[in-house]
Amino acid sequence: MSEQTALIYGLEDTPAPAPAALAAFQHILASIVGIVTPTLVIGGVLGLGPLIPYLIAMSLFISGICTFIQCRTIGPVGSGLLSVQGTSFAFLGPVLAAGFAVKNEGGTPENMLAMIFGLCLAGCLVEIVLSQFIDKLGRIITPTVTGIIITVIGLSLVKVGFTDFAGGARAGENLGAPVNLAMGAVVVIAILTMTFIGKPMLRISAIMIGIVAGTVVAAALGQVDFSTAGQGDWVAIPQPFKYGIDFDLGLFIPIAFVFLVTAIETSGDLTANSVIAGQPVKGPLYMKRIKGGILADGINSGLAAIFNTFPNTTFSQNNGVIQMTGVASRHVGLYIAGILVVLGFFPVIGQIFLLVPKPVLGGATLVLFGTIAVAGIRILATQEIDRRKVYIMAVSFGLGLGVTLVPDATQHLPPFIKQVIATPITLAGLSAIILSLVIPDTSQDAAVPPVQDALQDSIEQGI
């Protein structure tokens, strides 16, 4: 049976309110943890404390606005597919690096956020420009380059996830305590159980189920602090530039680099979405959707920075929901957007997520960050690894992971250069691009299609 005949509602069909709302809730169930977790990680690592609930609320609010734009389309902006937008994990590394750079100079949480949002607002212009040239970047952004960058993104974040798994950066003497490791292990086991034993919807919701199971176990062990529940504002009004904006060129380059990568990832996500929805994956209509979707990705990330949250991108897990439900109608996206916008007015939701203990969050993020690395490896595996690619990968991985494992190796460099190359994503990516251009290529290394195929395979297998 083809994807088209397997659909209950096609792209332009308009389901009745009841089935549309049901499908929308399934998409939210699959994506809400992905939307709020980057904010939880950033807030926890940088010590943003009482600001976190508001930041989570804004992540939900902006996710709704961005999903509306992506599904509805406004002029050339948007893919017109049922594509959910949410906070991107890919930016965690450079965002945390920017936050620590400000913090180390005595900056306040507000100063850190001003710098981060200023950098992201400028960085979104990279993706906006690239959206119009995505079909002409094959010589620079090859599967080798993309696979290396995505793999390094995942591997460089594992330290963050495993630190939380062991108790968190502020655990002190309790770091690695058996109770912390046990809570993290419960989450990993629950995720694996739901992924390999559960039904399709349970598999898609495995991360959320794992966090819930881990939190329940933690509560039974007395590891959940309920004293903060219900404190703070219950309702929040989105306020543009609440923390101001700042900018630093050295900190900007790593973030700009990730915007380049997310443009390629979005291309893959939207291609997979088109396949599942029975839509063309070549020709003028397809390319219009890809360019419009990436343009929306960039503009939406700009809106995210304006409204005090982190860059947005398309979510691949929602393609799995379309495949499972047979509902590809982009009108369902309007329901998803409405629900997320409403949730964004209530910071109390963020306060609920703050109840999740660090080891529980670490168990989930450890799996998430690991699967990012696996997605990069899958992209690399789609091509024949010849001698040229072996050395491109070897040098890029060596440099990228080297600065992660030995950060003091760059301490004597000029500040600007240090800010640029001390970020593993940037160093590995620049190395891969330069070596790909310098070392002669005797084979064809076409850019986008292998990346899309690998991402589609990852979606189908739950990665």
Image: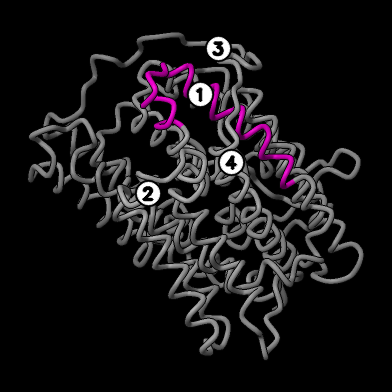
Which type of secondary structure does the marked residue at label 1 adopt? helix
Give coordinates of residue 12: x percent, y percent.
84, 52
Q: Using a 10 Å C-alpha cutoff, classify the residue at mark 2 as few (fewer than 14 neighbours), some (14 to 19) or many (20 or more).
A: some
Q: Nearer the viewer, mark 1 or mark 4?
A: 1
Q: CA distance from mark 3 to mark 1?
A: 18 Å
The range drawn in magenta is 99-127
Q: Amino acid at mark 3?
A: Ala
The image quadrant where one finds the N terminus is bottom right
Q: Is residue 436 above or below residue 13?
A: below
Residue 80 located left or right of residue 381: right
Q: Quadrant of residue 48?
A: top left
Is 5 in front, or is 337?
337
Q: Helix, strand, or loop for circle 3?
A: loop
The dot on residue 236 is 3
Q: Earlier in the sequence, mark 3 or mark 4?
A: 4
Quote the CA–CA distance across marks 3 and 4: 19 Å
Whole-percent x, y for residue 253 in the image: 59, 44
Q: Amino acid at mark 4?
A: Gly
Q: Any mark on residue 86, and which?
A: 4
Question: Which of the two residues, 348 or 271, is positioned nearer the viewer here?
Answer: 271
- Pointer 2 with pointer 1, Cβ within 8 A: no
